Image (cartoon, rainbow, N blue to C red):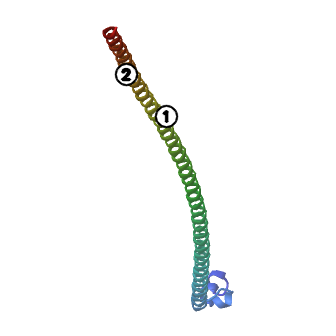
């Protein structure tokens, strides 16, 4: 039965027909599986490398951001301290100004009070001198009045003595006559 192609193909080895044998197919399959596994391993390593790079880049970026944040924080802290010190200086200047104004007001009040006291003292002194003058004038007036009274009494007594003496002389002359 050499004639039918179907019976020939069954009897003829597949390698003769241009088809790979089972062993060749198995080897090819193993080769493909090995290539697939190698490609899978290569892809897995590539993926791991990419992840590691991304992780490093992320860490780097995180470090940069953290550094920038720390720098910003330091800048803010410096600015805050500058403003705080400026506020302290302004407050100290204001306080000094208030203290100076208060000192000036106290000094002004003290001077005013001293002037008032001096004025009151001067008035008291004038009043006392006036009172003393008035008292002296009254004493002098009293003394003058007393002197006038004494002089008047003396004059009256002298006149009376003179009259009495004249009358006595008249009486003695009348006796002699």
| Residue in the image at 53% along x and 52% along y | 99
The numbered disc on residue 126 is 1
| Residue in the image at 30% along x and 10% along y | 175
Mark closest to the chain's N terminus, 1 or 2: 1
Q: Position of residue 132 (x, y in %)?
A: 43, 33
Q: Is residue 166 left or right of residue 28?
A: left
Query: With respect to residue 86, does 155 lie above or below?
Result: above
Q: Nearer the viewer, mark 1 or mark 2?
A: 2
- The quarter of the picture where the C terminus appears is top left
Extreme front residue here? 177
Location of mark 2 (residue):
154
Query: Dot 2, crowdedness within 10 Å: few (<14), some or many (≥20)?
Result: some
Q: Position of residue 100 (x, y in %)?
A: 56, 51
| Picture quadrant of residue 82 | bottom right
| Picture quadrant of residue 24 | bottom right
Q: Is residue 148 left or right of residue 40?
A: left
Q: Secondary structure at mark 2?
A: helix
| Residue in the image at 40% along x and 25% along y | 147
């Amino acid at each position: 039965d050499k004639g039918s192609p179907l019976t020939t193909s069954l009897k003829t080895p597949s390698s003769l027909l241009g088809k790979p044998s089972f062993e060749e197919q198995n080897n090819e399959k193993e080769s493909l599986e090995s290539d697939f596994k190698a490609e899978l391993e290569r892809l897995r390593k590539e993926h791991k490398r990419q992840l590691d790079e991304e992780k490093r880049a992320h860490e780097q970026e995180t470090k940069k951001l953290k550094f920038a944040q720390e720098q910003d924080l330091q800048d803010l802290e410096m600015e805050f301290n500058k403003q705080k010190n400026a506020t302290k200086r302004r407050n100290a200047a204001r306080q000094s100004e208030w203290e100076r104004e208060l000192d000036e007001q106290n000094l002004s009040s003290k001077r005013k009070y001293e002037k008032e006291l001096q004025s009151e003292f001067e008035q008291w002194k004038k009043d006392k001198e006036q009172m003393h003058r008035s008292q002296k004038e009254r004493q002098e007036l009293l003394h003058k009045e007393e002197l006038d009274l004494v002089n008047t009494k003396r004059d009256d007594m002298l006149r009376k003595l003179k009259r009495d003496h004249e009358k006595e002389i008249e009486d003695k002359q009348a006796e002699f006559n």
